[in-house]
Image: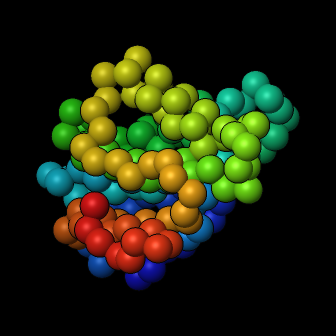
């Protein structure tokens, strides 16, 4: 079953026939994690780097922010038997969209905060496709761990 993850959302599954997918990652970041032993995976689509910008919104929508959404993604997979050091982590997005002058650099800031969180928690990224100016769609097949990426102007491929 196809499970669509919207902006500021996250889903986790251990159903082999589920496919997690998120569309139109621009400056947002998609974090895909999968445990090949437990056959559990998750996908987070976060929009902004730091929840301290709006604590009220962070309470209501923790998946909107990297610093609140990323820990919740990992914790949710652990409930289904995932183990941190087995997780295969892939990161996509962080484009510079509608900010040609680079004034806000939201994509870069989103990626930088993710790297910092992962470094602090000793999490390695297996593969990533970040930056540039295109939109991305990413999907994860729970049963196989196959991650597919579609990038505007570059087509679709396995990540």
> What percent of the width, then of the height, locates residue 16?
26, 72
Question: Viewed as shown, does residue 150 lie left or right of 57?
Answer: left
Q: Residue furthest top?
A: 120
Residue 124 versus residue 71: which sits nearer the camera? Answer: 124
Question: Viewed as shown, does residue 83 lie left or right of 99?
Answer: left
**Residue 9: quadrant of the picture:** bottom right
Quadrant for the C terminus, please.
Answer: bottom left
Quadrant for the N terminus, please.
Answer: bottom left
Residue 73 versus residue 117: which sits nearer the camera? Answer: 117
Above or below, 2 against 68 in this view is below
Q: How many marks?
A: 0
> What percent of the width, then of the height, locates residue 36?
17, 54
Which residue lies at the image location 60% right of the left edge and 43% below the top edge?
Answer: 107
> What percent of the width, then of the height, locates residue 110?
58, 38
**Residue 2: quadrant of the picture:** bottom left
Q: Is residue 22 visible?
A: no
């Amino acid at each position: 079953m196809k499970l669509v993850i919207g902006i500021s959302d996250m889903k986790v599954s251990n159903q082999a026939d589920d496919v997690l997918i998120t569309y139109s990652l621009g400056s947002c970041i998609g974090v895909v994690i999968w445990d090949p032993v437990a056959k559990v995976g998750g996908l987070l689509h976060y929009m902004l780097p730091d929840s301290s910008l709006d604590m009220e919104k962070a309470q209501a929508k923790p998946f909107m922010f990297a610093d609140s959404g990323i820990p919740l993604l990992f914790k949710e997979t652990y409930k289904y038997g995932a183990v941190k050091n087995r997780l295969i982590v892939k990161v996509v997005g962080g484009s510079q969209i509608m900010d040609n002058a680079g004034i806000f650099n939201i994509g870069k800031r989103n990626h930088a905060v993710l790297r910092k969180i992962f470094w602090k928690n000793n999490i390695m990224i297996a593969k990533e496709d970040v930056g540039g100016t295109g939109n991305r769609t990413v999907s994860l097949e729970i049963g196989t761990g196959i991650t597919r990426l579609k990038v505007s102007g570059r087509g679709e491929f396995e990540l």
